[in-house]
Image (cartoon, rainbow, N blue to C red):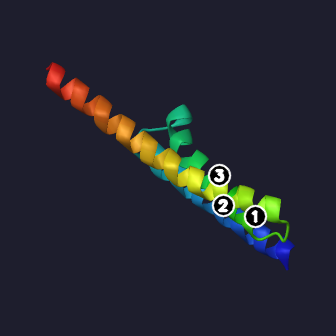
Amino acid sequence: MLTYQILVIFLFFGLFSALTTILLKRFGVGGAKGIFFLVPLFFFCLGFSLRLTEAKALVDTGYFLTEFSYLFVYTLFAIFLFLGQIRYWKK
């Protein structure tokens, strides 16, 4: 059962990654800029897969990775808000 759950998680990761890439290309954003959207998703999927295992160390690492994905997005959002304010006030 664990194998099927992990397969489904990474199947949805691939689907979501493909849809995100297509959407970004339609708006003219591609290449390295799109990685900011896919890295947190990958860490979340990997962490959630580790949380499904029975080994305590892997479950703890899974919780860390899922929380890290949230922290990564939050930090990027805060950095870009800060940099946007600096650019706005320099004009």
Q: Dots 2 and 1: beta carbons under 8 Å?
A: yes
Q: Dots 2 and 3: beta carbons under 8 Å?
A: no
Q: Secondary structure at mark 3?
A: helix
Q: Dots 3 and 1: beta carbons under 8 Å?
A: no
Q: Quadrant of the N terminus?
A: bottom right
Give the labeled residue for mark 3.
43
Q: Measure the C-alpha gap from mark 3 to mark 1.
A: 14 Å
Give the labeled residue for mark 2.
63
> Which one is in front in this view, the residue at disc 3 or the one at disc 1?
1
How far from the left and from the top, in percent, is residue 62? 71, 59
Give the labeled residue for mark 1.
59
Amino acid type shown at disc 2: Tyr
> Which one is in front in this view, the residue at disc 2 or the one at disc 3?
2
Residue at the image point whose x is 50% and y is 35% from the top: 33
Q: Residue 13, relative to residue 39: is it above or below?
A: below
Quarter holding residue 4? bottom right
